[in-house]
Amino acid sequence: MALRVLVADDEAAARKGLTSLLSGWGYEVEEASDGEEALQKATVFLPSVVVSDLVMPKLDGLALLKSLQQELPFVSVILLTGQGSIDSAVAAMKEGAYDYLMKPVHVGRLKALIPKAAEKGEALREIILLRRRVRQVWGLGKLVGTSAPMQEVYRLVELAAPTPAPVLITGESGTGKELAARTLHELSPRAQGPFVAVNCAAIPETLLESEIFGHEKGAFTGALERRLGCFELAHQGTLFLDEIAEMNSGTQAKFLRILQDGTMRRLGSKTEVRVDVRVLAATNKDPIKALRDGTFREDLYYRLNVVSLPMPTLRERPEDIPILVQALVEEFNAKYDKHIRSVDDEVLKILTAHSWPGNVRELRNTLERAAIVCDGDLIAAKHLPPEPSVRIEADVIDSPDTVSFRIGTSLDDAEKQLILRTLSAHGNNKTRTAEILGISLKTLHNKLKSYGA
């Protein structure tokens, strides 16, 4: 069967010339006079390669590329551009275009590009089909779950992973934002490079800039030797910045500059260093609220939010709990040299009924403790932690160990009550409270300070 190529160009002469050329090379060719028509024909014709002009009416080449990535992610796109549109073509490459050619098209280069682009598309098609089969019964990469919310996460990860685009991962604490970042890295062309993770909330503000940019010997008191920052450590790999909105405004501004031009300067240095890093960032805050509050710079937000990846809470995907439980049990078997088959029916009922405010992290901690104390091949109710929160029945709505809210309670008030009641229930142990709630100790201290507690 002949390889299929779709040619999209609003200039009839150029379009006909390319069609004739490609047909003469033995390809099956279809034409489209604009991007909108090209998208419609692509879904029926199913080409391996699309050769498209960058500037077209109705839907330009870049918009066509983005639409094809959504509809037919295995199709390789080669863009044609005039002299004045080179910057746009380079931008399209960053968005996932296979390559671009200057007009008038160099025939030899086009002839060499088509089979290579088709080969990449076919490889991607096989990978996508394989991943779909795997994720339907388990998950994707380090992410586990087969629910509709997780299928959407997998779709976005598969689209974003092959590109160098920054990704902003949002979601509550414990939803697996770092796992999503690691999966993006492992499925990217940078998978053989380093993956460097930095929790911006866990580093004292006075040391954050040094941690990110590095420093020279003598840059400040205590700087006894040169130290590379996380950007240089992540060179040719991926840098994951968790809780990005915890950075102060000044550090955010310097961080923005690196994203814009790829250069940075260590503290105490006069020399700029060029770095090649893909940046992934995450926050458990509502980014729009953080923008309004002034804790998240607007220019940095838009630079990072090229791809938005929201992570669902565990209460939004309770059907994933059984498969998560099994995956965690197998992990803890390997970690602690156990031979646990699973959990019994009573435990599964308890785990499914719980609301999991700490999300997957809380479920993980609960099962890890249960696995450690389990002396048989099945986790039973007696192995669950003594904390009442895990044993709560779905119909219990008012007891000393629960928090209930009236309809109409604001999210801020509900959060405050939950934090203070949890702290009280655990003897004002802040470390334990932060662990149960799935937030950092620094975040808990900031919350309590805002409550005047």
Image (cartoon, helix red, strand yellow):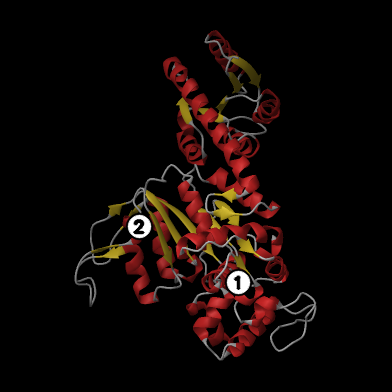
Task: Look at the picture and state if 120 lies above or below 358.
Answer: above
Determine whether, in the image, residue 389 is placed left or right of residue 285: right
Instruction: Tell which tag, 1 or 2, sits nearer the viewer.
Output: 1
User: What x and y, as percent, mark residue 170?
Assistant: 58, 61
- Look at mark 1 in the image and give the residue it sits on: 358
What quarter of the picture does the N terminus occupy? Answer: top right
Looking at numbered disc 2 in the image, what kind of residue is underneath it? Phe
Q: Give 49 or 384, whichever is nearer the viewer.
A: 384
User: What x and y, as percent, mark residue 124?
Assistant: 54, 34
Q: How dense is the environment of label 2, judged by Cα within 10 Å: few (below 14), some, or many (20 and up)?
A: many
User: What x and y, as percent, mark residue 138?
Assistant: 61, 50
Write the residue at 63% across / 77% down.
382
Q: Give the image quarter of residue 437.
A: bottom right
Q: Is residue 103 visible?
A: no
Which element is circle 1 on?
A: loop
Which element is circle 2 on?
A: helix
- Look at mark 2 in the image and give the residue it sits on: 231
Q: Give 386 or 408, whichever is nearer the viewer.
A: 386
**How far is the residue under mark 1 from the one under mark 2?**
30 Å
Write the residue at 24% across / 67% down.
268
User: What x and y, as percent, mark residue 211?
Assistant: 34, 67
What quarter of the picture does the C terminus occupy? Answer: bottom right
